[in-house]
Amino acid sequence: MKKYNFNAGPSMLPREVIENTAKQILDFNGSGLSLMEISHRAADFKPVVDEAVALIKELLDIPQGYSVIFLGGGASLQFMQIPANFLVHKAGYVNSGTWAKKAMKEAKHFGEVVEVASSADANYTRLPEIKEIPSDLDYLHITTNNTIFGTELRKDIDAPVPLIADMSSDIMSRPVDVSKYKAIYAGAQKNMAMAGVTVVILKDDALGLSGRDLPTMIDYRTHVDKGSMFNTPPVVPIYSLLETMRWCKAQGGVKEMARRAEERAKVVYGEIDRNKLFRGTVEEGSRSLMNICFVMNDEYKELEKPFLDFATSRGMVGIKGHRSVGGFRASCYNAQTMEGVNALVQTMKDFEAQH
């Protein structure tokens, strides 16, 4: 039986990315050595890093004066590394969900933090309404996509201060005006690579201004100066990222990824809104195209587990909602296909027909 992967992350990758990475794991560039066992300083590996950086810059149209680095530790490490490097006096945070709240908590270790907007009062079922942004902030931190609750900000907001964004779960799914940002970071295991590497985009002239005597590994300049090679980087995840960026470019780039995201989401949300058994959990204007969250209508609540079992029997993988909210979540990242989306929708229709 064919499986359809809707996992929220680590998540589905294009088949050719998996196959090409697997070939290099067996024999990297004809060297007779596995990608898993080569030195990160091998002559053949530096071009991998260089091409991956170049493709990210090309695909996101990153202007001059920005660096791209590859780190470990996931976006969760960036929750503290960002304020360590950029919070001088005061930072603003938009509280749009679990991960935004975690980022804000870590920032408080380094200075004054202002909650500029929040949708906690609505249980994060909508994007926060940003009414006023203080002009004396060092930066405004936003989390563009909320994987747990299913909201997404798919535009670059206008602000009187530089933006910093956690784009872990929607980077490469749409064009971004990088010039508005002091930094962008993303755990790569949604739209960019297998798990294990974090991508950080940094404005060069914003580095080194915190006034702190930072530990070497926490100072972004360490990794910019050494081209992500200060210590051993996650070699295999970076290679898988390179293959994904090649795939993304060949498919038409981020504009095409945005078109496909809209197409997929229209089909799934359309069925959620039509089907008597289900309802979406997010206000329509805030709905994520990456993580589509839904629950059983109240009168059919007892059918939640039967539907999950039914969907699993049809090959659906990873549609159970996050443990903190329940229900269902269909994650539709760049690699998700219309075949997978249509299979999910048909599963929902067939289950409805039985009830």
Image (cartoon, helix red, strand yellow):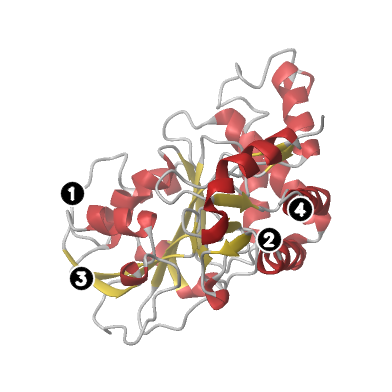
**Which amino acid is tagged 4?**
Val
Query: What residue sits right under mark 3 in the picture?
Result: 90
**Considering depth in this image, is 312 or 129 the residue closer to the camera?**
312
Residue 145 at x, y = what percent?
A: 50, 61
Callout 1–callout 2 Cβ contact below 8 Å:
no
Q: Is residue 35 above or below residue 172?
A: above
The residue that appears at 54% across and 47% down in the rendered structure is 302
Checking the image for residue 82, the label placed there is none
Categorize mark 2 by other alpha carbons within 10 Å: few (<14), some (14-19), many (20+).
many
Residue 271 at x, y = what percent?
A: 72, 63
**Considering depth in this image, is 84 or 109 the residue closer to the camera?**
109
Quadrant holding the N terminus: top right
Callout 1–callout 4 Cβ contact below 8 Å:
no
Indicate which disc, 2 or 4, sits on the residue closer to the N terminus.
2
State how far apart marks 1 and 2 are (Cα).
35 Å
Q: Is residue 179 above or below residue 291?
A: below
Query: What residue sits right under mark 2 in the picture?
Result: 59
State how far apart marks 3 and 1 are (Cα).
18 Å
Query: What residue sits right under mark 1 in the picture?
Result: 213
Nearest to viewer (mark 2 / mark 4): 4
**Which amino acid is tagged 1?**
Asp
SS label for mark 3: strand
SS label for mark 2: helix
Q: Is residue 140 above or below residue 70?
A: below
Nearest to viewer (mark 3 / mark 1): 3
Query: What residue sits right under mark 4 in the picture?
Result: 341
The residue that appears at 36% across and 85% down in the rendered structure is 160
State how far apart marks 3 and 2 are (Cα).
32 Å
Callout 3–callout 1 Cβ contact below 8 Å:
no
SS label for mark 4: helix
Categorize mark 1 by other alpha carbons within 10 Å: few (<14), some (14-19), many (20+).
few
Indicate which disc, 1 or 2, sits on the residue closer to the N terminus.
2
